[in-house]
Image (cartoon, rainbow, N blue to C red):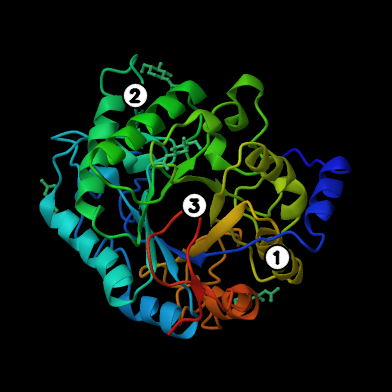
Amino acid sequence: MKFTTSSAAVTAAAALLPGASATIYYAGVAQSGGEFGVWSADATPGTGLPGTFGVEYQFIDEAGVDTMVDQNKVNLHRVAFLLERMCPPADGLGAKFNETHFDFFKQSIDYITTTKGAYAILDPHNYMRYNDPSSQPYSGSIIGNSSDPTAATTAQFGEFWGELAARFADNEKVIFGLMNEPHDMPSSLLLDNLQAAVDAIRAAGANNLIIAPGNSWTGGHAWTQGGDEASSKWLHKLVDPANNTAIDIHEYLDQDFSGSHTACTQDAATNLADVTAWLKEHNLKAFITEFGGSNTTECLDMLDSMVDYMADNEEYIGWTAWAAGPFWGPNSPCCTDSNQYGSLEPGSTAGDGTPGLYDTVWLPVLQKKVPAQLQWDGPASVEGGELTEKA
Ligand SMILES: *[C@@H]1O[C@H](CO)[C@@H](O)[C@H](O)[C@H]1NC(C)=O
Ligand SMILES: *[C@@H]1O[C@H](CO)[C@@H](O)[C@H](O)[C@H]1NC(C)=O
Ligand SMILES: *[C@@H]1O[C@H](CO)[C@@H](O)[C@H](O)[C@H]1NC(C)=O
Ligand SMILES: *[C@@H]1O[C@H](CO)[C@@H](O)[C@H](O)[C@H]1NC(C)=O
């Protein structure tokens, strides 16, 4: 909620001067649906677990992915899943997976990467919590909380990532998103958990691109806030022996950066100036894997400016807008004060049958900002790869 002006705005303007080489290599949408079906109004643990694939949850709609890749020319999908479905609580977090669930997930990732030739971010949508998603984003034990005997340990988080990474190590189009939106936890523990994951991934022989989130919901505007707990005090300490880790940022444009309100009032260029400066200082690259706005004139203008800001600043190499997904129906993934304005899923309609956010936000604004040239071959990398138009 802190709106900084003046010096931050000047820095942002300076970064837009011609001559800076800046490139977006990866662009697309978040696919939200794998995490559906576990919420409980009275927070009953275990609600919707394991859930029925195709009924209560599903990762992607293949026809929607076809439209996104073939017509919209996007090369990136971020695919949400739940740790409690991949690793059922009876067994605990770790290397033992529900193979049936994993197979469903792998089919979706293979469809995006092998069939469609795009890149996919694996997104454990768990807020650095495990064992009770019934009241996400607040329920569940914080991974690595040694005061909580029911919490999964940092080592278990590493074992989980080591196993998942081994299974995708031979697919260079798979990107490992270590965790969705950690929040309200010590940043030292966040760093320990992220380091355990990176170490396990590399020990498994996987050199895939990793993206690592900060604390405070990985909010870009909040990156340098919070004193000693600020993400800017911790995330550059993450060590990757393969030098292939980027920062994962989320940024919404509404008053409290939550992505829940219709009105856009928070200018991204202004609010991202500090994290952009931090990225530059530490020679780091970043993805913005969640951002969005409603279909108001202000939101459309501000979303347009936000994507320009990423394109104009070399620290940013990729983005996914929130969100498409198979099960939104007329509901909205963000930014509508709970009005049913539909989603970014192709063909989406609003509750009143009028066109959904795919038609009112994605096509008029975001689709036009998908770079004509993106990376379509080779390993996902902090360095990016060869840029070509989609074949
Ligand atoms: C594993 O996942 C499948 C598919 O969702 C489900 O039918 C099955 O009950 C799950 N098993 C456990 C132990 O959670
Ligand atoms: C860790 O667990 C203890 C015991 O359940 C709890 O009191 C504490 O709030 C937890 N820490 C955090 C950061 O939530
Ligand atoms: C990673 O970067 C460091 C510092 O620039 C360098 O010494 C090291 O050789 C690099 N490692 C790899 C695997 O590229
Ligand atoms: C946004 O979309 C909804 C659903 O079509 C519509 O009711 C509303 O009027 C639109 N808002 C604007 C500002 O166009």
Residue 41 x, y percent position in the rendering = 38, 45
Q: Which mark is residue 53?
A: none
Is 374 situated above or below 134?
below
Q: Say which amino acid is labelled 2.
A: Gly
How many numbered marks have been drawn onto this rendered protein structure?
3
Residue 382 circle label: 3
Cβ atoms under marks 2 and 3 closer than 8 Å: no
- Residue 308 disc label: 1
Q: Secondary structure at mark 3?
A: loop
Q: Quadrant of residue 364?
A: bottom right
**Horizontal and vertical percent position of residue 330:** 47, 72
Q: Calculate the distance from the C-alpha at mark 2 to the C-alpha at mark 1.
A: 38 Å
- Using the numbered discs, state the Cα–Cα distance from disc 1 to disc 3 in whole angstroms: 20 Å
Q: Residue furthest top?
A: 147
Front residue of 33 and 19: 19
Looking at marks 2 and 1 on the same chain, the residue that comes earlier in the sequence is marked by: 2
> Could you tell me which residue is drawn at 63 percent across and 44 percent down?
220
Mark 1 residue element: helix
Q: Is residue 284 left or right of residue 196?
A: right
Q: Earlier in the sequence, mark 1 or mark 3?
A: 1
Image depth: mark 2 or mark 1 in front: 1
Residue 355, quarter of the rendered image: bottom right
Q: Which residue is mark 2?
A: 144
Mark 2 Cβ inside 8 Å of ligand 2: no
Please state which amino acid type lies under the numbered disc 1.
Asp
| Placement of the N terminus among the 4 image quadrants | top right
Place of residue 142 in the rendered image (x, y in percent of width and height, measured from the top left): 37, 28
Pick the residue in front: 294 or 116. 116
Task: Say whether residue 70 is left or right of residue 306.
Answer: left
Query: What residue type is disc 3 on?
Result: Val
Q: Residues within 10 Å of mark 1 (few under 14, many from 20)?
A: some
Please give the name of the residue rendered at 87% of the width and 48% of the height, measured from the top-left corner.
10
